[in-house]
Amino acid sequence: MIKKILVANRGEIAIRVMRTCREMDIQSVAVFSEADRDSMHVRFADEAYCIGPAPSAESYLVIDNIIEVAKKCKADAIHPGYGFLSENAEFANRCEQEGIIFIGPSAYAINTMGDKITARKKMLDAGVPVVPGTSEPIEDLKKAVGAIKEMGLPVMIKASAGGGGKGMRLIHNEDEIISGVNAARSEAMAAFGNDAVYIEKYINSPHHIEFQILADKHGNCIHLFERECSVQRRHQKVVEETPSPIMTPEVREEMGRYATAAAKAVNYASAGTIEFIVDDDLNYYFLEMNTRLQVEHPITERVVGVDLVKEQINIANNLPLRYKQEDLKQNGSAIEVRIYAEDPDNNFMPSPGQVKHITEPLGLGVRHDGYVYEGYTIPMDYDPMISKLIVWAPTRSEAIDRMKRALYAYKITGIKTSIPFLSRIMNVPDFVKGRYNTHFIQDNQQHLELKDNASDKIKDVVAITAFVDFLTKVDSATKVSSNGSIASNWKTCGRIRSLNRL
Ligand code: MV4
C-alpha cells in the first residue's frame, strides 16, 4: 500500500492532493522550483525538495530531478496533478521502470489518447460517435480537397498531436483549403514536432460537455456524469457546472455509456475525462480524452459525493472500485469559477505581484481551492490561475446566488483578479437561463464589459478598508516572509546535494 506520495506539481492542485494524502495517512512530499520556496504547497507537505530554477522546463518538467527526489525520500508513488508531466507517457513509463507507482493511467493509454488520429480510430472501433471526418492523416492534398468537398464546408483541420484548441484551423471556402492545410501542418510541426493533421466537419456553436470516469485495474469502469464547460475564453475554461443545463436523463445515460466504453477501449485505469462537443439538438461527438485529474474535478466531487484523488490512489493500490454505476446519482448543482491573477478590464493582462490582503469566501456550500496567502508574491513563471471557487446548492438558481455571494465576499488586494468579470457572468441573462454555448463570452461582450457602477466603487472601499486592517495586522503580529528563505520554520526542508542547489 502507498505510504508516501511525491506530488510533482505546485499551487492549488498540489495542496488539493496533499489534503487527501493527510486523510489517508499517507506522507506527502513537495517539490519546488527556486521561485516557489515560499509557496504554500511547500509548507503543506511533510517534506519538500528543490528541483531547479524557476522556468518549468528546468524544474517541474525535469523527469530526472523528480525521480531523483522520489528515490531519495523513498516515495512509493508520484501524483502528477494536472499540466506539467501529467499527460507525459515517458514520465509514466519512467516511474514504472524505477519501481515508483504513477498515479494515473498507463503510458499506453496516455499515448493512444494523446494522438488524436489514433484516438479517433479507437473510438470508431469501440462504437463511440466521433465528429464526421477523416481517420488517417492527410497525405495527398488533392485527396484532402476531394474529401472536404464531399463532407461539405466548413471543416476544421486539426493537428493529431494537438488538443485543447492548439493546432486547429477553420476552413470556410474551397479556395482556403490548400493554404489552410499547409498552415495547420507547419503550425503543428512547430508546436509538436509532428505535422500529421486530419479533417473534421465543423460543428457550429457547440457545447463542450465532458464526462468524468473512474476505471480500476480489474476491468470495472463507471462514469460520474457530466460537466458543462462551454464558458471559455481563448480555449481556457472560465466557469464549469454540473449538471449541464441542457442535458436530458436519456442523453446523459447514453453519453455516460459511451464515456465508459471509450475508457475501456484503451484499458484505462485511473480518473479520466471524455470530452464531447454537443450541438443544440443534443447530437454529441467524442472530441478527446484527458488522461489526468482535471482542474474542474471539484464540481463532480461535490455533486456525486466522491473524492476523486482518493479513488485515484485506491486504483493505484490495485483496489477494485468501491462504487457501482447504480450507486451514483447527481445531488443538487455545483458551479466552479477559476480565479486568475489577470486584469479583466485591461485585456486580461497577467497581474503577478504581492498579495497584500486576502479574505477567502466561506460559509454554507462554499469550497475554495487556493494557495495564496497574505504577503505571498505570485511568481510570473507559471499559469496565473490562483484559485478555484466552487459552490453547491440544491438547485442551479440557488447555486448562482451562492456564487454571487461568495464572489462578493472574496477580497484580494495587491493584485488584479478576474473576480469582477466572474461576478458579471453570474448576472448575464443567457447564463442565468442556462442558454449558452462556447460562443457565450463572444456573444455577451456588452454584458461583460467594465461598468463604472456604484457597486464596484463600494467594493473598492471595502477592499481599501481591508487593506488598512491588513497593514495594522502586519505591524503588530503577522509574520510575513520576505527574505528568500523557506517561510516554514516548523519543518525541515531537504535538498538534493547532487543538484547543487539551495
Ligand atoms: C471543434 C469545434 C467545432 N467543430 N471541432 C476547441 C478545443 C478543442 N478541444 C476542440 N475545439 C473545437 N473543436 C469541430 N469539428 C469547435 C471547437 C471549439 C471549442 C470546443 C470546446 C470548447 C470551446 C471551443 C471554442 C472554440 C472552438
Image (cartoon, helix red, strand yellow):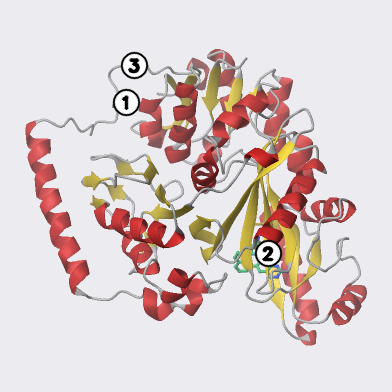
Left or right: 317 as drawn, with respect to 501: right
Identify which amino acid the numbered label 1 is placed on: Ile
- Is mark 2 in CB contact (under 8 Å) with mark 3? no
- In the image, 398 versus 235, the foreground residue is 398
- In the image, 495 versus 136, the foreground residue is 136
* Mark closer to the chain start, 1 or 2: 2
Q: Residues within 10 Å of mark 1 (few under 14, many from 20)?
A: some
Q: Residue drawn at (24%, 52%), measured in percent from left and top?
A: 411
Q: Residue 140 in the image: state x and y as whole percent.
A: 91, 70
Q: Residue 474 in the image: state x and y as whole percent.
A: 12, 37
Q: CA distance from mark 1 to mark 3?
A: 10 Å
- Is mark 1 in CB contact (under 8 Å) with mark 3? no
- In the image, 221 versus 379, the foreground residue is 221
- Image quadrant holding the N terminus, namely top right
Mark 1 falls on what kind of element?
loop
- The image's mark for residue 486 is 1
Q: Residue 32 in the image: state x and y as whole percent.
A: 45, 30
Location of mark 3 (residue): 491
Left or right: 412 as drawn, with respect to 186: left
